[in-house]
Image (spheres, rainbow, N blue to C red):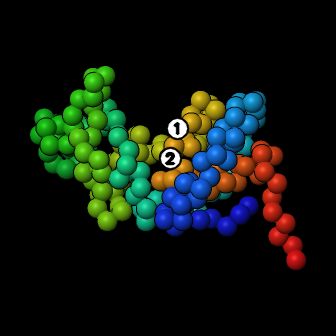
Amino acid sequence: MQPIITDRVFIKEAANNNEDRHDALRMYLQKMDGVVLDEMVHAINEVVTPLVDCTTCGGCCRQLMINVTDKEHETVAAHLQMSSVAFKQQYLEESLQGKLIMSTIPCHFLEASKCTIYEQRFNECRAFPHLHEPNFKGRLFGTLVHYAMCPIIYNVIEELQYASGFMNRPNTTA
């Protein structure tokens, strides 16, 4: 495994420089068996995720639209000692599809790269970047869209290129 990179400036620059390679990687991975690909991604993710401290980044909180369920908004409202109605009015809006979403990007609850409601954060926040879930192939395009924003995605995709055989690992012996 390559060293873990968390510098968001470096990652954003790498994303800009690797667009063509990512298009080729996406086409390459689409030809793989989905179960095998999921196993690879899950294994890499299990190594990478514990090595990245999301609370020092907050990139997803700055850039993603978050869906919120009724139960979640009631739980967070209670945590904040607010009524459900007041919470909804202050923090949520309804999407065109009729779902509740956070009313601002970045998230209302992001403060200095940290979530102020971390223990009560929404399920969508807990699950991001969804690399532990099945059907990676079905989310591949979206995952690559977030490559520039998320150190976990960056590191998993970089390692996946070698694990999948898309790229040969550089020779590191002298």
Of 2 and 148, which appears nearest the observer?
Answer: 148
The reply, left or right, for residue 76 in relation to residue 172 is left
Q: Which mark is residue 146?
A: 2
Query: Which quadrant, please, contains the C terminus?
Result: bottom right
Label 2: element kind? loop
Label 1: element kind? helix
Q: Residue at x 62, y 65 (%)?
A: 4
Q: Quadrant of residue 152?
A: bottom right
Give amino acid for label 1. Answer: Gly
Of 92 and 50, which appears nearest the observer?
Answer: 92
Q: Residue at x 76, y 32 (%)?
A: 32
Residue 170 at x, y = what percent? 81, 63
Q: Which mark is residue 172?
A: none
Q: Residue furthest top?
A: 97
Residue 30 at x, y = what percent? 70, 31
- Labels 2 and 1 touching (C-beta < 8 A): yes
Give amino acid for label 2. Answer: His
Residue 18 at x, y = what percent? 62, 52
Q: Residue at x 14, y 43 (%)?
A: 90
Does the rendering let one see residue 28? yes
The residue beneath circle 1 is 142
Q: Quadrant of residue 133?
A: top right
